[in-house]
Amino acid sequence: MSAPGTLPRWAELGLLPVINLVAALLISGVVIMLLGESPVAAFKLMAAGSVGTQEGIGYTLYYATNFIFTGLAVAVAYHAGLFNIGAEGQAYIGGLGTALVCLWLGAWPFWAVLPLAVLAGAGFGAVWAFIPAYLQAKRGSHIVITTIMFNFIAASLMTYLLVNVLIKPGQQSPESREFSVNAWMPSATDVLARVGVGFAATPLNLAFGFALGAAVLVWLLVWRTRWGYALRVAGENPAAAVFAGIAPPRVIIGAMLLSGALAGGLGLNELMGSQHRILMDFPSGAGFVGIAVALMGRNHPAGIIVAAVLFGALYQGGSQLSFDMPKINRDMVVVIQGLVILLCGAMENVFKAPLAKLWHGCLARDPKPTGGTPAPR
Amino acid sequence: METYTLIVLLLAATIRVATPLLLAAIAGLFSERAGVIDLGLEGKMLGAAFAAAAVSATTGSVWLGLGAGIATAVLLALLIGFACITHKGNQVVAGMAVTIMVVGLGPTLGLAWFGLGGQTPQLDGAGQRFMGIAWPGAAAAKEMPFPGLLYSELLSGQNSIVYFTAALVPLSAWIFYRTRFGLRLRAVGENPHAVDTAGISVNGLRYQAVVISGVLCGVAGTYLSTAASSGFVRDMTAGKGYLALAALIFGQWKPVPTLGACLLFAFTDALATRLQGVALPVVGVIPVQFILALPYVLTVWLLAGFVGKAVAPRAIGVPYSKEK
């Protein structure tokens, strides 16, 4: 991709995502106006519903937990030059691993179940990412297509398992029995109560901490290790990587294993933390929100956390909106999500080029007007 | 005789499922042979399905609905073109983004306009749907099962979109391999620099390809909401755009093999419905989900190069710039 003009780092990382978000919100505002509601009132409602109360904040961070996991998953693959659309399927299969541990070892104490559940979730997610990774690395199959296919294969497999194997006997809806209380992730309310802080009852749970931990881990791995360096070189320039003695196939497989493992973390929040059972389609699109989050967060863990919280607020605010404005439902949030992906991911050059022109134009004219000469770069 | 009737009905179901699949796959074929990855198939179809049903419900004319469906899908295609061709954006991301946007936009507009929880009203008035066209003598042919049933159930009684789709395969094969436009289209997907050197606009050709894809997706979406069912419901494409993409790859980016892939995938779908809970000799009950997953597994298998080899157009996914 050729960049028509360059921007300083702070503008590239900070300003551009904000401009893209504002543009996405403006377009959504127009849509809301077309629906016959006031966009200002709608966004106010969303803000109040997502960060205005303790309950709203709890839900926002609970959604954000899912998006941090999937956003990190997309980002790690992205740094290796891979576009992982399969986070949805990897999260689904990863959750299966977590749920199996919780169902089988429910009699064990929490401190024994937890590490196994984490390992199983990461392991199952990694396995589901391994096959597309192997096929990309060794057989040259396009990873975008194979990961899409694997999302559908995962959905079929999970439907089969939930309907025929895991279903609680004597029940209609395809979901497992409830995990024993030992396998429940402690809720934020309980954790905070222990240190003497009161917090409203929400699905927010300890998995949020795991998500933040995963973000730190990704930062260390990708930016502070030899492996991460190889990953980024292979992603930027595979030919140069080969000259530097890096084997791209190994990097591809390694990056996708980590990516799948991160997506597998979703089960900790959604299943152990909130639902306490495994049920049909529990990732409910978080894998695709991860794409938006990674793009908006510029594939950096810090940016991803910010973007994930923002999307968490959008999801929570969106449900609030559908209560108060009967003409608008939660699907409006999906529209905003699509717009963010479009503007941050596919149309970044649309704003970047004029912004760069503006920037260089200002710099050139500031100290001494130089007449007709072009702005220095 | 019962087996025979069963097979004919299975084939009839195959045609019904294959029609939107084939339309979308041929749509993708035009876009991808010109070098633009078409991950927006799902979104364009879904958008068209909503627009067609909404317009048909309000105006009472399915043909106006078809027009609205095509217009919507073309607009979405132009949006993808604007991002990917003019501004050299990432094609995969653009397609995904448009699909996600439409997934949300359909039910949002549906709720605001019709107040039915995101659906469109039932299309039950005369002229609001594409209905089957009975050929002369179809009713009489039914009396004599062989070969009459083949005539009455498969040839006759389909709607106009099905016949259009059947004609589309030879038509697009002719366009791709026998016309100057088709040659240029294939060239721009393989080696855009050569096309540019010949003094032909690369972006112009790609825009034409993307618009053709939009038109065909529009027809496919209209089929879903006004022929296959009577109205728009949330997520009604249910992954058919991606299945079409799989068929297109399975058909190795060629019209006739793509037709074969679509028929195969549609047949597995029809078979899965038919085999639900039926115990077969020797193998017993085959879980429906495994049959439904078969197209995706086959496509991955082919992509892996274990059987044959799917070779994508060489310049696919790469935005064109003169300097490189």
Image: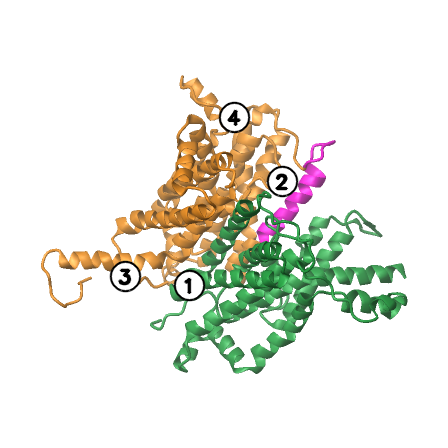
Chain ID for label 1? Answer: B
Q: Which chain is green?
A: B
| Mark 2 burial class by Cα count in 10 Å: few <14, some 14-19, many 20+ | some
| Mark 4 burial class by Cα count in 10 Å: few <14, some 14-19, many 20+ | few
- The image shows residue B98 at horizontal and vertical percentages of 48, 55
Looking at the rendered structure, the secondary structure element under dot 2 is: loop
Real-space CA distance between mark 4 and mark 2, rounded to the nearest whole angstrom: 27 Å
Q: Is residue A45 magenta?
A: no
Task: State if disc 1 and disc 4 touch (CB < 8 Å).
Answer: no
**Viewer-nearest of labels 4 and 2?**
2
Residue receiving disc 4: A111
Real-space CA distance between mark 4 and mark 1, rounded to the nearest whole angstrom: 53 Å
Real-space CA distance between mark 2 and mark 3, rounded to the nearest whole angstrom: 47 Å
Looking at the rendered structure, the secondary structure element under dot 4 is: helix
| Direction from residue B177 to residue A255 in the image, left or right | left
**Viewer-nearest of labels 3 and 1?**
1
Q: Which residues are magenta?
A: A149-173
Against B292, is A3 above or below? below
